[in-house]
Amino acid sequence: MTKGYKRDATCVYCGATFVAPRVDVTYCSKECSRHAGNAVRRRHQPVVACVGCGGLFRQSRSNRRYCSAACCGRAAKDRANERGWPRQEPHRHLDGFGRPVNPDETPPDWQPPEAA
Ligand SMILES: [Zn+2]
Ligand SMILES: [Zn+2]
């Protein structure tokens, strides 16, 4: 990078505007950096977009991808629908009456065609 890197930045602790000498400098002063130490560790939760609904939420864990359990459950259901089950490979898993051969493969909402 350029030697004379300078950037207008906002102190993430006190909100003051200052010129940051390096891209990784996020505090206006050593005091702010020190004071913010604990608080930042606690609230180091990036705001990310939920992969389910696209809404923004604070990511409390780095592997969280959904804003809520409801979104996660809905997305799991969508994924099941995308698999097209039980239409996928119907002849392999269904017996002559259109019922899955293996009960473990029956989706929870599966209905026999004759009952529909
Ligand atoms: Zn500051
Ligand atoms: Zn969501």
Image (cartoon, rainbow, N blue to C red):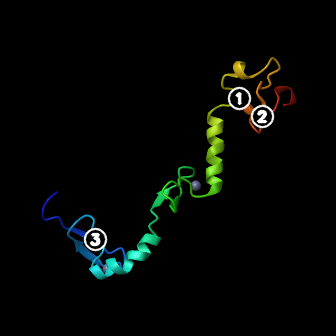
Count of marks placed on residues: 3
The first of marks 1 and 2 along the sequence is 1
Residue displayed at 86% across by 26% down: 114
Q: Which SS class for mark 3?
A: strand
The quadrant of the rendering that contains the N terminus is bottom left
Say what secondary structure mark 2 lies in.
loop
Q: Which residue is mark 3?
A: 9
Which of the labelled discs sits on residue 86, or is there none? 1
- Taking the spot 22% from the left edge, 73% from the top edge, the residue there is 19
Vertical order, 84 against 27 (above or below): above
* Residue 69 x %, y %: 64, 56
Q: Is residue 47 left or right of residue 18?
A: right
- The vertical placement of 64 against 36, above or below, is above
Gap between marks 1 and 2, in whole Å? 8 Å
**Residue 85 x %, y %:** 68, 31
Asked whether the beta carbons under mark 1 and mark 2 sit within 8 Å of each other, the answer is: yes
Label 3, ligand 1: CB separation under 8 Å:
no
Q: Is mark 2 within 8 Å of ligand 2?
A: no
Find the distance from the CA under tag 3 to the CA under tag 1.
55 Å
Looking at the image, which residue is at 27% across and 65% down?
Answer: 24
Q: Residues within 10 Å of mark 2 (few under 14, many from 20)?
A: few
Choose top left, top right, bottom left or bottom right for residue 8. Answer: bottom left
- Dot label at residue 110: 2
Nearer-N-terminus badge (2/3): 3
The picture places residue 112, in percent across and down from the top left corner, at 82, 29
Q: Assign a secondary structure to mark 1.
A: loop
> Of circles 3 and 1, which is in front?
1
Residue 51 x, y percent position in the rendering: 53, 50
